[in-house]
Image (tube, grey):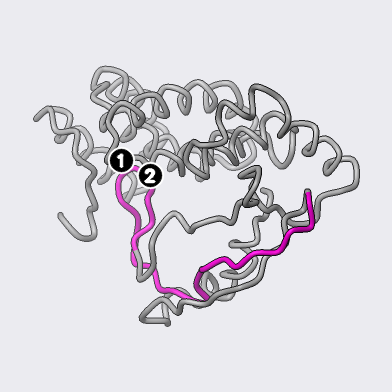
Amino acid sequence: MLKTIAAVVTLSGALVATSVEAGTPITVEVTCPLTGARFNFETTASYSTWGRELDGLQMGSWTFPLAIPQCPDSRFPVLEDLTSEQLAAAAALVQTPGYQAIRGEASYYVLSYVTRELAMGDAIDPAWHLLQATWQVRDQPDLYRRYATELTASWEANASAFQTESPQDWMWIESYIANVERQAGRFDEASARLDRLEPLAAEDADLVERIGLTRRLIAHGDSRPFAPERDF
């Protein structure tokens, strides 16, 4: 997957996540890859984590998903190690009507759009970033439902190869997306996804438990986000 500046800065935090008790805020100077403009970005040097909610949102001592820096003028996400060809394509992309129409969306939605339009990173990156974007807009029901619809379409279009390459990760992301569907009020679609997933997940006790919990929430018409480690 592509790296943002935030991912690079917090890599050490991810590696020691189980031993650090609290996030450590820092301010770093970031350079926009398109213009060379420099600006300050607040992030963390380290953080601890203790699980994920049913839709995959990480729980820990910092705010998740991790904030990503965006160029002040274009809102283009600051990505690492872009080639000259990719930089040229990105500079052209931010001038297009399509990009201008989405530049004000949640930062991970913009990142998803960029990775899709410029064919950067892995095939599932746009869907993964859309999942992260749903975490950012949980308090905006209409926007959440739109992001959920786009997420499922992107995931279904690109996940088949990923399922073969990383079946365990694929199953967990399937469970996350089922919960996004549940949280969007699409209970029938969430149930159908779980029906397809459950036989494949039979040997993963943790995942089976989460699938059962998701089914109970669906049965009660419950669309709230849910954190097993915190609420169960």
Task: Name the element at disc 2.
Answer: helix
Q: Residue drawn 69% across and 49% down?
A: 2
Above or below, 12 against 150 in this view is below
Q: Which mark is residue 64?
A: none
Q: Nearer the viewer, residue 156 or 72?
A: 72
Q: Position of residue 89 (x, y in %)?
A: 82, 35
Q: Quadrant of the C terminus?
A: bottom left
Q: Which residues are magenta?
A: 35-59
Report the side of 180 relative to 70 (left or right): left
Circle 2 residue:
135
Instruction: Please check the rendered image and state whether residue 50 is part of the magenta-colored stretch, yes or no.
Output: yes
Circle 1 residue:
138
Q: Residue drawn 70% across and 52% down?
A: 79
User: Residue 47 occupies which quadrant of the picture?
Assistant: bottom left
Instruction: Please check the rendered image and state whether residue 186 is part of the magenta-colored stretch, yes or no.
Output: no
Outermost residue, right side: 84
Above or below, 126 against 69 in this view is above
Q: Residue drawn 39% across and 28% down?
A: 148
User: Disc 1 and disc 2: Cα gap in Å?
Assistant: 6 Å
Above or below, 125 against 78 in this view is above
Report the side of 40 relative to 23 (left or right): right
